[in-house]
Image (cartoon, rainbow, N blue to C red):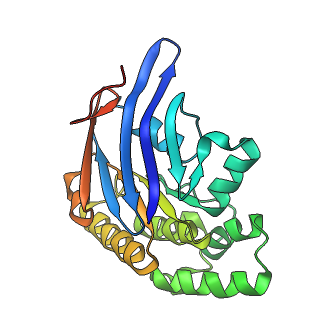
Amino acid sequence: MKALQVSRVTKSYGPNPVLRGVSLALASGERAALMGPSGSGKSTLLNCIGGIDRADGGLIEIGCVPLGILDEEGLCRLRRQTVSTVFQFFHLLPTLSAYENVEFPMQLTGVPASERAERVRMLIDEVGLSHRAGAMPHELSGGEMQRVAIARALAIRPRLILADEPTGNLDSTTGEAILDLLESVSEKHGIAMLVVTHSPRVTRICGRTFEMKDGIILGQDAEP
């Protein structure tokens, strides 16, 4: 079953085309790397897939839902219930503990308190941070913060995780551990994962690698 379908997607800012007919697909549980130089369109594509920005043309489907038919409320619901993002700089809420950061997305969607508590406990344990559940973000190392961010991404039981340079702010040893964790959670939960990266080492956990340049994926024709 396809988790993600991107077909001939275009996006421009003013007169400047950023995406020029991008197509890719991911099956449930599949991991792919998206590589390319700065300015190639990687982040724009990720924003369009995540519903943060709207494509000008083409089709993006998450599961069987085309994003083009969703209004702003629908896109917000998509981000809260179906698609999670893991960022380079973690983006944890600084006034919430590790436990509370993982719990927060479930509060937004109305998950009952007892279910939240059980799910947070399981996720914190899965990422190896049971002993740090009460710690605040400023008390955590970079690797620990990224583990919390991954647990938070899993909290909504997403169909798709978008990872934007997830090891870019970590040393090589910690980065390798985070890659192992991403691979493990993807396989365990059957979650598709698209990883934007500059690092070739990320490709070791991915079945496919897409190379972007000047708004196209190499090997694909640009939109006429």
Q: Where 73 sits versus 93, above or below?
A: above
Q: Where 63 sits versus 144, above or below?
A: above
The image position of residue 187, as x and y in percent, is 37, 76
Q: Is residue 66 left or right of residue 215?
A: right
The image position of residue 159, as x and y in percent, is 52, 65
Q: Quadrant of residue 211 in the image?
A: top left
Residue at the spot 63% in from the left edge and 83% down from the top edge:
119
Q: Where 89 sits versus 222, above or below?
A: below
Q: Is residue 12 left or right of residue 198?
A: right
Q: Quadrant of the C terminus?
A: top left
The image position of residue 143, as x and y in percent, is 40, 67
Q: Quadrant of residue 153 in the image?
A: bottom right
Q: Where 82 sits versus 70, above or below?
A: below
Residue 141 seen anywhere in this rendered image of the structure = no
Residue at the spot 21% in from the left edge and 58% down from the top edge:
201
Q: Quadrant of residue 18 in the image?
A: top left
Q: Nearer the viewer, residue 10 or 137?
A: 10
Q: Is residue 153 left or right of residue 18?
A: right
The image position of residue 127, as x and y in percent, is 46, 79
Q: Nearer the viewer, residue 119 or 144?
A: 119
